Amino acid sequence: MTDILVCNKIDTPNVAQLFQQADSIRKKYCGDDVHLRGIIEFSNYCEKNCFYCGLRRDNKKLTRYRMLPDEILETARQVVANGVKTIVLQSGEERRDIKEICNIVEKIKRELDCAVTLSLGEKTVDEYRALKNSGADRYLLKFETSNEKLFKKLKPDSSYLARLKCLDILEQLSFQTGAGNIVGLPEQTIKILEEDILLLKQLNPAMISITPFLPHPDTPLGKCLPGDLNLTLKTLALARITVPTSHMPATTAIRTLHKQGAEKALLCGANVIMPNFTPPQYKNLYLIYPDKVCLKEDAEQSIEEIKGLLTKLGRKISTGYGHSLKR
Ligand code: SAH
Ligand code: SF4
């Protein structure tokens, strides 16, 4: 694993072989269907101060918003009207009455034919249980890095063990659970990346999200270099080989880093794309990193582009929910 991660030339035979192997494992376990997950970023308030993220509480330059329940519901209807079978509700991490979110999830599940994924950060057991009981199917909580020291440095008001505990609770509550890391964080070594992949093997999550680090100017890491595209793709490919059944998106961050990021990721293990349905007036404020590719396109337009890309690759949009392949 070390040799392949250190090798920084993408056109060497062993990297090409890695990508081919990841692609054939994807084909064997997930097929040629690509699942769309419509993301709604419903609030950018955050009480945490992660060093890498533009939503961190100390970023006073950011105008904060919280979508109203009716706005969220209306946006959810648009997601489903576009043939998308999963709604992802994502936000910064804030202490707010969990009942409000449970009510929204209940309404979505009652009215619309779709799965619901939540990505709201660390919560208590009772809160996670309430969210599950409201009908949420999945929960995405990335561990970000498997290195405890680096984690503490970059996520000062959380702890690595608390994060892992949350993942364990989510599994126990029968959520389809998603984990993952960020590639290219300052001080992250190849050894740490290898350990990230070993942690994924141990967790065996239903979904894995791997994003390259993209520096945001209004964070303490604003002047650091972005994560490397090829290293991100190699990590993605290794994750696919290590956890063959996981659903893995060609993340917005990969698409932001490189114009052909979606295609490249789909060819080395990815089988999911997440069109962004956040209404434009809010989307511009959900800046975990700058210049997000989704700011330039609306969701319908991006679905059209995805269809074109999938035709070129001999793949197609799934008509199913894209539930966990583990069960
Ligand atoms: N607040 C929740 C969910 C929103 S953040 C949480 O933290 O879990 C969603 C993801 O964005 C994070 O898990 C992190 O991996 C990613 N992220 C944040 N800032 C980033 C950056 N600058 N570059 C790449 N990924 C980033
Ligand atoms: Fe908040 Fe999540 Fe960003 Fe951390 S990564 S600052 S918890 S939104």
Image (tube, grey):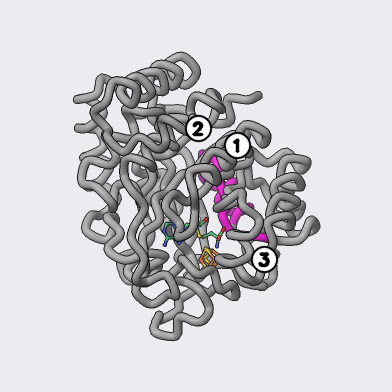
Residue at 55% across / 53% down in the picture? Answer: 144
Q: Amino acid at mark 3?
A: Ser
Quarter of the view holding residue 243? top right
Disc 3 residue lies near ligand 2 with CB under 8 A? yes
Label 3 SS: loop
Closer to the camera in the image, 20 or 90: 20
Label 2 SS: helix
Disc 1 residue lies near ligand 1 with CB under 8 A? no
List the residue tagged with mark 2. 239
The question of residue 121 being in magenta is answered with yes
Of the 4 image quadrants, the one containing the C terminus is top right
Residue at 34% across / 74% down in the picture? Answer: 217
Disc number at residue 108?
A: none
Report the residue that reaches farthest toward the bottom: 60
Residues drawn in magenta: 105-122
> Residue 141 placed where, x, y %?
60, 51
